[in-house]
Amino acid sequence: MKILLAVSVVLLGVIGSQGHAASKAKPQAAPPTKWPSVFVGTVPKSGTHLLFKALTLITGTQWQFHMSKWEGHPVVACHLNRRDRADMFASDKWRSIVLYRDPRDAIISQLHYIIDRNYHWLHTFDLKGLQRFKALPQEQQISFLINLSNGRDINWFSREALKWRDAPRILSICFEDLIGSKGGGDDAQQRVALEQIGSWLGYNMSEKQLTHVADNLFGDSKTFRSGQIGNWQNYFTEAHKVLFKQKMGDLLIDLGYEKDYNW
């Protein structure tokens, strides 16, 4: 996991029921002596609500889209967009967090998000366009999303995340490090990511607190579906791979998901 300076996600709370003794008191990390202002920017379908859940548990404050204050300090919590730039938040007053994901998995997550709803928040479709999209065979739907270029597509968001990741004073976290073994990741790497997030916000968690966060992070969020790494392999045809390499092959290499085009 590549970390520069920006922030991502940590959990706190009660020791859960999964083989652990329940505790009446939630294990709380000591709050920071100085509350920072925080920017949280994410790629859509990269685990945004997973990150918010972690932030909620570590800080004791409910984190969500478009919140504006945290302990009286400014907060910007949104998907990455054209208005917010890394240099705007590159100061000692801000702690910035950027979350991204393998764009191939983000495409598949986006596909299910669209199919399961009667609207699409990316404004890619009007109602008739959405109905036409849903009527397409799944292979064509995936090709459409790979090809999509409207300034609010996975390609654009992921390239924007790359700019933020390489900017100073940004903590950059990828979904794959945050999800843990329940989502096909690594528990040790998850703990590292959670610890870094907490530290970045000024919370130093004990081992007990960190374990609670890791044990309770997976699932049960607003848009959670399966949360699995590498799920794109169950959907992409060879034609999809060729198309994706044309559109985003370089991006996969730059983000560190592939070493070359031979995948």
Image (cartoon, rainbow, N blue to C red):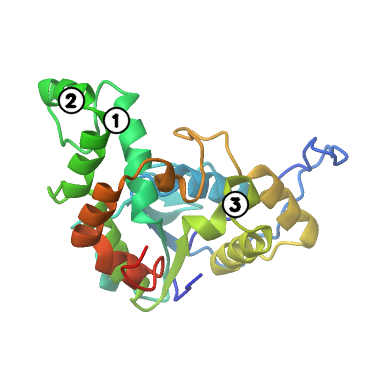
Tag 2's secondary structure?
helix
| Residue 180 placement, left or right of 35 | right
Position of residue 100 measured from the top left corner of the image (x, y, whole percent)? 39, 57
- Residue type highlighted by circle 2: Leu
Q: Earlier in the sequence, mark 1 or mark 3?
A: 3
**Tag 3 secondary structure:** helix
The residue positioned 46% from the left and 60% from the top of the image is 174
Q: Name the residue under label 3.
A: 59
Residue 51 vs residue 30, the one in the foreground: 51
Q: SS at mark 1?
A: helix
* Identity of the residue furthest to the right in this view: 21
Q: Name the residue under label 2.
A: 130
Q: Which residue is rendered at x = 68% and y = 50% of the image?
A: 213
CA gap, disc 3 to disc 2? 39 Å
Residue closest to the eye, 126 or 72? 126
Q: Is residue 63 above or below residue 135?
A: below
Residue kind at label 1, given as amino acid type: Ile
Q: Is residue 79 at least partly visible in the picture? A: yes
Q: CA gap, disc 1 to disc 3?
A: 32 Å
Question: What's the distance in space between the residues labelled 1 and 2, CA to CA?
Answer: 8 Å
The percent position of residue 124, horizontal first and vertical second, equals 16, 36
Check the image and report above or below for 5 versus 151.
below
Q: Which of marks 3 and 2 is nearer the N terminus?
A: 3
Q: Which residue lies furthest to the front in this view?
A: 238
